[in-house]
Amino acid sequence: MKTNDIRITLPASKSMSNRWLMINHVTGGHFRINKLSTSNDTRLMRDLLTQIETKSSNVYYCDNAGSVARFLMPLLSITPGNHVLTGDERLRQRPMAPLIDALRSMGFRIECTENEGFLPVYIHGGVPNKRTVSVDPLLSSQFVSSLLLIAPCLAEGISLTMTQRPTSRPYIEMTCDALRQAGIEVRRSSNGRTYYVQPFTGKPKPATISIERDWSSASYFYTMALLRPDLRIRLLGLQLDSCQGDSATDAFFRQLGVTSTEVRSPYRAAGRSVTLNGGGILPKTLQFNCLDCPDLVPTFAVAAAAVKVKTTLKGVSNIALKESDRMQAISDELMRMGGKITASGEEMTIHPATLNPVEPVRTYNDHRIAMAFAPLQLIFPNLQIENPGVVSKSFPEFWEQFDQVLQNKL
């Protein structure tokens, strides 16, 4: 390792953390989870699972955490008693209908108390009358994962068929891998549309689970390596052979001349890291399908705009349904800076244009918008990011780690 490597500590994956918290809950808490995410979403998941266990309240407030709400809805459906599941204004606008419909088809009683298909919902906990279910995963793969995660608690397990090609399929496979690691049998049909999860029987052997470092968080440092090719950034604990869908970051930035090299310490079994080097040849045009990694769209769009590479991002329609309308947020903020974007249906194209700083960059209370635009401070030192604390949803230490790059004077 060169002495001028900038060593970045990434957070643990909140996607993996929240899945393991759920698995630990449904299997009786036999697993010890190391390196659990410190994100607000994971803290919230942990606290709400404790609330279920202690029965301290029957109102479960999920703030603006879509994955937490979607994971808890099936779990509360099999938890005896009556429950209210709700969240903040934005979460109450995010789609829940495919999951609600799937649960109702299994015999669960769920009432939408304001608008049909949206939170808040009133849930009558009970036992399903069927184990087969169909679900539309187009808007979110979390509808599938949430149902698979309660399967070990069902007397006959679950047979789940997806009615369409899912968004973010790697995150469904992440769920299946975690269940298998916990000793639960999971199979997938030959056509890839149906998952079979067996009930949990017996008692698992206590085990220690180590959570991978987060690829979503790593993506912002790839933009920094792109914009500062004179620096070499080392992402501690990250691994290239990851089950996380957002490891697609590597493939995208490779096309922009950023190389990733995995380094393993000869002294520690878990001593992995990934070193980034920018400065490669930029293409004239670039196309990338983001259907399996929609959370990366803000990162990719800002990076492409910064280096003036015409870039078409496909499979982006559902980003309007995230913590903010990310399609609108990205377009508005880049165009305020002089960028040019066209978007229609499943595609967004970033056209070459000269960017200029604006004050401040609006973040729409969305952690990924804040972190995607932050690397532009490397070329616009006085650029301000509105509501910087919003990053705590997934990466509370982001600004501390970013400052190591921002203050480097090599």
Image: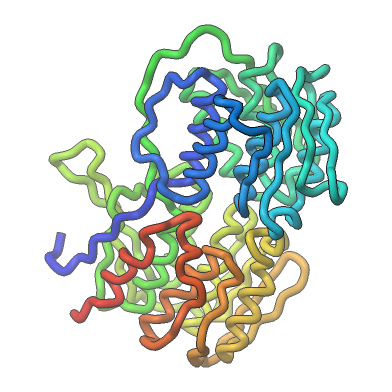
Residue at the (67%, 70%) spot, across then down: 327
Q: Residue 9's image quarter?
A: bottom left
Q: Is residue 253 left or right of residue 90?
A: left
Colour scheme shown: rainbow
Q: Nearer the viewer, residue 202 or 162?
A: 202
Residue 229 in the image, given as x and y percentages of width and height: 30, 76
Is residue 216 visible in the rendered image? The answer is no
Residue 402 in the image, given as x and y percentages of width and height: 34, 68
Q: Identify whether 61 is placed above or below 354.
A: above
Q: Is residue 227 left or right of residue 48?
A: left
Residue 387 in the image, given as x and y percentages of width and height: 50, 72
Q: Identify whether 275 is placed above or below 344.
A: above
Residue at the (18%, 79%) spot, across then down: 410
Residue 324 in the image, given as x and y percentages of width and height: 65, 65
- What residue occupies the far top of the structure in this picture? 202
User: Quadrant where the N terminus lies?
Assistant: bottom left
Residue at the (50%, 64%) spot, across then down: 390
Residue at the (47%, 77%) spot, across then down: 385
Q: Nearer the viewer, residue 63 or 42?
A: 63
